[in-house]
Amino acid sequence: MKKLWVFLLAVVLLAGCNPPTPPEKPNPPDDQPNGYESSIDDVVDGDTVHLKNPVLGTTKVRMLSIDAPETNYQGKSQGKYGEEAKVYLKQLLPEGTKVKVIPGKQAKDDYGRLLAYIQKGDMDVNREMILQGKAVPYIIYPNFERVQPYLDSLNEAKKDGRGIWNPDDPLEELPYEFRLRVGHRQPDKYAGNYKTKEYVEPDQYKDILIEQRVFFWNEEDAKKAGYKKK
């Protein structure tokens, strides 16, 4: 019996010497899956804003999946429609406006600007710019999260003749067409038809109606997205 008590005492003492097992760490949540809170510092033009507080290391935001008429591209502008887009965005986002910044799958462009959706309360500001005819969809893979609502907004703006779609005074060139001409460049993105899931060579992008047009950086991306060559 004495030996049994000695054995049990030794077991208890040994157990006391072992450190407790640490609790399992929970998996970290996704980094701000619903966006980042910030506020507007300034509106640069119809699709570019500056934030007061940086998001992912930058305060410069190029609004994702839209393209507004240019106010100053290589010293040239698209006239009143560029200025009207800027003025309208300033009305939507005066300095100090609290916003939610939602980065796309491709977070930054070649200039280091954040590519993001701007949310003001329940309003998707990017979509609002299309809806009011102040910008056009410019949707580039892999940022396809909002293709359908943006194309639907384009259809509504065109139907009602809003902004750049005014039938009596339409915008002469789409913003990306204007940049190509002024920059003496050729189209370099493959274009896809979101409805038929077909794609064409960069210089054939006009074969696809703007109401169905999306873009890919290269042919591999088009195939990855499930598109077939037309």
Image: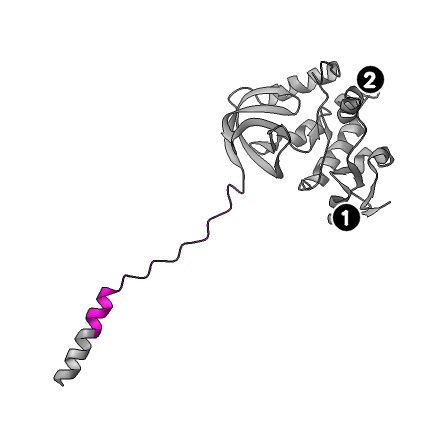
* Residue 11, x across and y down, in percent: 22, 74
- Measured from the top left, where is residue 116 in percent x and y? 61, 33
Residue drawn at (74%, 17%) of the image = 81
Which amino acid does the dot numbered 2 rest on? Asp
Instruction: Please state which of residues 181 and 195 is positioned toward the viewer in this rendering.
Output: 181
Q: Quadrant of the C terminus?
A: top right
Q: Which mark is residue 28?
A: none
Question: Residue placed at 60% from the left, 23% from the top?
Answer: 92
Magenta range: 11-33
Can residue 27 be found in the magenta stretch?
A: yes
Is the magenta region chiefly helix, strand or loop? Answer: loop
222 left or right of 50?
A: right
Front residue (pair 149, 22): 22
The amino acid sitting under disc 1 is Lys
Q: x and y percent of residue 38 in the render?
A: 50, 29
Q: In the rendered view, does 199 fall on the left or right side of 43?
A: right
Q: Please name the residue shown 66% across and 29% down the image.
A: 128
Q: Which residue is mark 1?
A: 223
Colouring rule applied to residues: one colour
Asked if residue 13 is among those painted magenta in the image, a careful observer would answer yes
Find residue 62 and report its image quarter: top right
Q: Is residue 69 above or below residue 11?
A: above
Q: Closer to the camera, 153 or 70?
A: 70
Residue 114 to residue 50: above or below? below
Residue pointed to by mark 2: 169
Whichever of labels 1 and 2 marks the residue nearer the N terminus, that label is: 2
Sort mark 2 into few (<14), some (14-19) or many (20+) by Cα contacts within 10 Å. Answer: few
Label 2: which secondary element: loop
